[in-house]
Amino acid sequence: MSKQRNRAAILISGSGSNLQSFIDHIERRELDLDIAVVLSNRADAFGLQRAADAGLPTAVVAHGDFPGREAFDRAVAGILDEHEVDLVILAGFMRILSPWFVQHYAGRVLNVHPALLPAYPGLDTHQRVLDAGDRWHGSTVHFVTEELDAGPLVLQGRIAVRDGETAAELATRVQAAEHRIYPECAALYAAGRLQMRDNAAWLDGEKLEKPLVRDF
Ligand code: GRF
């Protein structure tokens, strides 16, 4: 009996270059996933155009229209549930999710963060890496839990920081890496090989004590 394809929602706030990478991987048949809906909290997010160009359903839920975080999250979840989504992919979604949302989709929310977590949660990661004089930087795909940027780590794309590199140059190279590792991670999930349980990531039935690393 063939397994039904996973239905993913991709949540964005901006450019949507990660969304584009998912679209391209699916078109090339390198990722066996349906994008059921692309949802943005900003009506002017360029990623909505990318979604429309690819013929994908889109939705906008403006966070300013809601009295608080959970009310916004419940509206978002209402749309995702209508689309019978079983995986939520955060791709540059610049809203912190409420505990209610994280529990509603427990173990089914992935995020990409532009740093080698647990180093540098939060914002301005590229400049912070340069200020610290680090030799390595990159991006991490992780499961989302209630604590920001702190859920179980799955896969990292790592790059060596070059002499004299600017934060903008670093950002470009980190993004190129995440465009590869994020669809790879979603493919593992879609194949049923990757799960979150007991606050840990499991791959092929083995607990991941540390994230997988790809060097770029
Ligand atoms: C990415 O760099 C990601 O790491 C961060 O937000 C950025 C989103 O970029 N969470 P895009 O909208 O996918 O182009």
Image: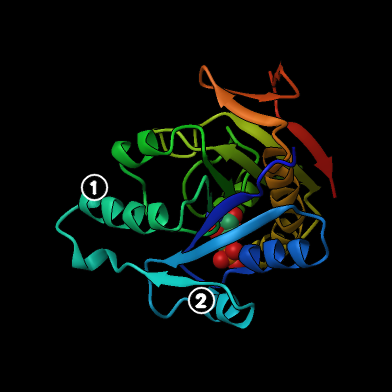
Q: Is residue 133 visible?
A: no
- Which is more toward the observer, 121 or 140? 140
**Image quadrant in which you'd find residue 162:** bottom right
Direction from residue 194 to residue 91 in the image, left or right? left
Direction from residue 167 to residue 76 in the image, left or right? left
Q: Earlier in the sequence, mark 1 or mark 2?
A: 2
Q: Is residue 207 above or below residue 65?
A: above
Label number found at residue 48: 2
Which residue is rendered at x = 71% and y = 64% of the image? 21
**Image quadrant in which you'd find residue 192:** top right
Q: Secondary structure at mark 2?
A: helix
Which residue is rendered at x = 76% and y = 54% of the image? 31
Q: Amino acid at mark 2?
A: Leu
How dense is the environment of label 1, judged by Cα within 10 Å: few (below 14), some, or many (20 and up)? some
The percent position of residue 139, horizontal first and vertical second, equals 67, 47
Direction from residue 3 to residue 70 in the image, left or right? left
Residue projecting furthest to the front: 1
Q: Secondary structure at mark 1?
A: helix
Label number found at residue 70: 1
The percent position of residue 127, horizontal first and vertical second, equals 58, 55
- Which is more toward the observer, 74 or 90? 74
Q: Is residue 206 above or below residue 85?
A: above
Q: Amino acid at mark 1?
A: Glu
How dense is the environment of label 2, judged by Cα within 10 Å: few (below 14), some, or many (20 and up)? many
Which residue is rendered at x = 65% and y = 51% of the image? 130
Q: Is residue 15 visible?
A: yes
Which residue is rendered at x = 76% and y = 47% of the image? 184
